[in-house]
Amino acid sequence: MIHDVVVIGAGIGGLTCAAKLAKNGLKVLVLEKNPHTGGTSSIFKRDGYYFPMGPLSFSFPGRVQAFFDELGVPAGIDFKRNHFQLLAPGLDIVYSRPIKTLGEDLKNAFPEESEGIDRVMDELGDIVGLIQDLDRWHPDFLAGSKKKKALDHLGPSDKEKIRAIKKASAQTSREVLDRAIGNVGLKNLLGSQGTSPPEMSMLNLAFMWNAMSEVGIWFPSSGIHGLCRRLQEAVLSRGGEIKIAAPVTEIVIHDRRAVGARTANGDIYQAGWIVSNADYKKTFLELMDPSNVDGAFLDIVRNVPYTGSELCVYLGVHPQKIDFGRMKAAHVFFQKEVRRESDGNPEDFDKREIEICRWSDNALDSAPSGRASLVLRVSFPYDHFSCWRTAEKKRKVGYKEYKTGLAGRLIETVGNILPGLSGSIEVMEIATPLTYRDWGQRFCGSVAGWTWSAEAASVLPGKILIETPIGNLFMAGIYAATELFLGGVPTAIYTAALAADLILETRS
C-alpha cells in the first residue's frame, strides 16, 4: 500500500509531524516499534503508582500550547512552574530564578566573586537578549521557504545579531568562566547548572539559562504523556494510521531517495516521503545500507557523540517517614562530596551528581492517597552496562541483582539529605542505560540529544538537521537540532512541525 508519508517512530516528534500532515490532508502512516505510542514521553504503572519513562517537565509551554492551537487540538492544559535546587559542597541554592536575581543571590553567597559574577551574568544576559524568538527570524534555525524568507528580509541589525550569535556559538563557556570565576563550584554551576565542568558553547549555555531562569521549566496538567495522547487522537481523527509493535528494520532507498520502510515481518510500506523520529545514529547506521549514503556524512554521524545515558530509580514511598526539610524545590541536584578528575568510578554515588524529583508534587494522581512518588537519576555510562546485554531486551543472569545493588547504594547516598528514605520504600523500579536503548529506542541509551561539547558539535552540518543527504528523507525530534534551543520537548515538536512544513512545500 502506498502512503504519502511514512513516519518512523510514534514519539512526541513523530506524532507531531504526523498530526500536522494529516491535518493538511496527507495520507500518513506511523510505524512504532513499541506496543505503545509516545516513546519516552510515556508512563508505566506499578502497584498503584505511575512513573514517567523520560522527560519530567519542559520549557516554553506557550510554544507548545500554540502548536496545539494551530492544529486545532483542544489541549485544555494548565502549566505549573517547577523550581530547581543545587545542593553540593559549598552550594545550596535555588537557581531557577531570573538571571539578574540569580546573580544577586550568587554575589551574596560569594562576595569575593562579585565582579566576575557580574561579568558572566551580563554576557549571558546579552546573549539571551539576542536569541529571543530565534526560530522565527534566524535563518540557521529555519528551513525551506521560511529560511528563504528570513534570508530575504535580513536588515543590518539582524545581520549584526547573527554575527554576535555566531561568535557566541564559537566561544566556549569554559574560556569565559575561567577568566571571570575562581571558585570551582560556582564556575561549574554557571557552566552546567550543576556540578559538571563547563564544556558547551556560550550560545548553548545561554539557551539553557534562558529556558531555566527566564522562561522557566513547567509541568503540563495532562502530563507529557497526555500531550502524546492528544497528538495520537489528532492523527487518527484526521485519517492517519498508527501501527504499534511494527518495528522498522530498513529504510528502502532507490537512486539516493527514500521510497519506503520495511518492517520486521517483511512488509514494505511505500511512500513519497519518509520521516524518521528515530535518532540520527540509529537512522543512518542501523536502518539503511551505508552504500547509499555519502561516506563523509556517515563519518560525522558516527563520530560526533551523543549525550550519555543514565541510571534511574523510581520509588513509591510513604512520605511521612522521610524528612524532606532540605528540599527547597521539587527538583534537587545533589552531590555529597567533591569529585576530583581522578574519581572516575560511576558506582561511587557519593561523588556523583544525583537528580531527585518529588514526582508526585507535579503528577498528583501518580501515587495512592497518602503516598508519594520519587524519581532518582544519575548519569551512567552505557559501556558499564553493555556487557549485561545478550540481545534486545535480553540480559545475562545476575543483571537484576546487579542493578538492584546499584539502586540500593544510590538510595543510601540520597538518604544523606532525605533521612528515612530507605525505610519508606513500598515500590521500586529501576531503569538502566540498557532500558533506554531497548525500550526507549535511543542509540546507546542517550537521553538528551547530541553532545553538549562545543568542540565536538562544531562539525555538525548546521543548527537544524531536518534535511538529509537522502532525498525525501527528513528527521524529526530532539536529534534533528544540534542544540536543544527550546529545551527537549518543544525542540522535538518544533523540528517535527518544520519537517511537516518541508513536505507540504515540496508537495505543493
Image (cartoon, rainbow, N blue to C red):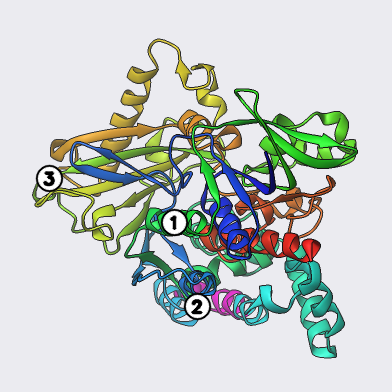
The quadrant of the picture occupied by the N terminus is top right
Above or below for 386 versus 100:
above
Neighbours of disc 1 within 10 Å: few (<14), some (14-19), many (20+)? some
Give the total of numbered labels.
Answer: 3
Q: Secondary structure at mark 1?
A: helix
Q: Main secondary structure of the magenta part?
A: helix
Residue located beneath label 1 in the image: 233
Residue at the (15%, 52%) spot, across then down: 323
Residue 92 visible, this angle:
no
- Whichever of labels 3 and 2 marks the residue nearer the N terminus, that label is 2
Viewer-nearest of labels 3 and 2?
Answer: 3
Which contiguous range is marked in magenta? 111-122
Q: Which secondary structure lies at badge 3? A: loop
Disc 3 from disc 1: Cα separation: 36 Å
Viewer-side residue, 295 vs 321: 295
Q: Residue at x 9, y 50 (%)?
A: 320
Disc number lying in front (3 or 1): 1
